[in-house]
């Protein structure tokens, strides 16, 4: 899957927007692959896998596209 980093927080997580999807996808800094949380910026294009977590779908293996 691909998307765009929409928001980041100071607490180490953020949300990814996906084209054609109304709800943004949660990601945590522990789920980044090949990039640090400080390196990734809002507006960056990313690739990821969607997994079902305790609080609903989230992004894993998030990497720059």
Image (cartoon, rainbow, N blue to C red):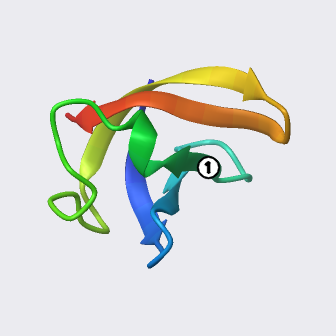
Residue 37 percent across, percent down from the top left: 28, 57
Name the residue: 64% across, 53% down: 24
Q: Nearer the viewer, residue 45 or 34?
A: 34
Assign the C terminus to one quadrant of the image: top left
Residue 51 percent across, percent down from the top left: 66, 21
Residue 59 position by quadrant: top right
Q: Nearer the viewer, residue 1 or 57?
A: 57
Residue 30 position by quadrant: top left
Asked which secondary structure carries label 1, the reply is strand
Q: Residues within 10 Å of mark 1 (few under 14, many from 20)?
A: some
Q: Is residue 7 above or below residue 48?
A: below
Q: Is residue 1 left or right of residue 22?
A: left
Q: Is residue 56 left or right of residue 26?
A: right
Count numbered badges in the picture. 1
Residue 63 percent across, percent down from the top left: 26, 34
Residue 29 percent across, percent down from the top left: 41, 49
Pick out the residue farthest to the right: 55
Q: Is residue 37 left or right of residue 56?
A: left
Q: Is residue 27 above or below residue 58?
A: below
Assign the N terminus to one quadrant of the image: top left
Q: Nearer the viewer, residue 57 or 30?
A: 30
The residue tagged 1 is 26
């Amino acid at each position: 899957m691909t998307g765009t980093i929409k928001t980041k927080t100071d607490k180490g997580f953020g949300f990814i927007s996906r084209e054609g999807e109304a709800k943004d996808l949660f990601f945590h800094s522990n789920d980044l692959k090949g990039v640090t949380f400080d390196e990734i910026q809002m507006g960056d294009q990313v690739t990821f896998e969607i997994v079902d977590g305790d609080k609903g779908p989230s992004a894993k293996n998030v990497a720059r596209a």
